[in-house]
């Protein structure tokens, strides 16, 4: 596995732990359907959360800016595929978590964005 992929998995592990600590139930990780992927699918308080995780070393630019319009469209299509396989009337939230490791001597910064469209 490439170092980039290892760092991404580390960031996703941090994000999952953050979500568990904040009362989320994790339904799936790295869920795929054809070319579409959702990093984390979770639920809490009667809502489904489709979460994109962005991990960065330091931060020369905003990690969340990597969630492009194309990525958002793929997330929407993946959500539709998930809902076809797992019918639910729960409202859906498209969310993001940025995990930024500023220094190897500090805990990572975690930024939760419940509504991806507000970024």
Image (spheres, grey):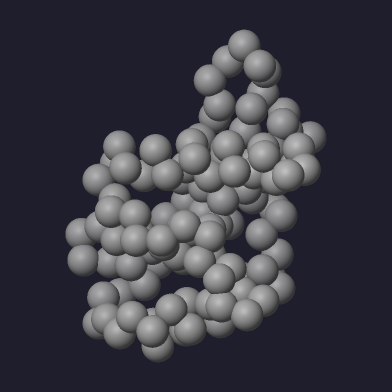
Q: Is residue 48 left or right of residue 12?
A: left
Residue name at image x 36 percent, y 72 percent = 92
Looking at the rendered image, the quarter that the N terminus falls into is top right
Image quadrant assignment for residue 71 = bottom right
Residue sitting at x 28%, y 53%: 25
Judge whether 33 appears above or below 7 on screen: below
Q: Nearer the viewer, residue 49 or 84?
A: 84
Q: Quadrant of the C terminus?
A: bottom right
Whether residue 98 can be seen here: no
In the rendered view, would you say 58 is above or below 50?
above
Image position of 10 (left or right of 7)? left
**Residue furthest front as drawn:** 1
| Residue at the extreme bottom | 84
- Which quadrant would residue 61 be assigned to in this image? top right
Report the number of numbered marks.
0
- Pick whichever, 2 or 73, lies toward us: 2
Height in image: 36 above or below 31? below
- Extreme residue toward the top, this view: 105
Q: Looking at the image, which residue is at 39% across and 38% down? A: 17
Depth check, front residue: 55 or 72: 55
**Place of residue 8 in the rendered image (x, y in percent of width and height, measured from the top left):** 64, 44
Q: Residue at x 25, y 45 (%)?
A: 23
Looking at the picture, how far across and down is residue 54, in whole percent? 62, 48
Q: x%, y% of residue 67?
A: 66, 59
């Amino acid at each position: 596995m490439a170092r980039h992929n290892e760092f991404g998995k580390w960031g996703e592990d941090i994000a999952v732990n953050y979500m568990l600590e904040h009362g989320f139930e994790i339904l799936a990780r790295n869920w795929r359907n054809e070319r579409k992927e959702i990093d984390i699918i979770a639920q809490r308080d009667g809502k489904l959360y489709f979460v994109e995780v962005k991990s960065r070393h330091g931060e020369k630019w905003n990690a969340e800016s990597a969630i492009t319009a194309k990525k958002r469209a793929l997330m929407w299509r993946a959500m539709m595929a998930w809902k076809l396989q797992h019918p639910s009337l729960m409202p859906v939230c498209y969310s993001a978590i940025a995990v930024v490791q500023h220094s190897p001597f500090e805990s990572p910064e975690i930024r939760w964005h419940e509504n991806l469209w507000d970024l």
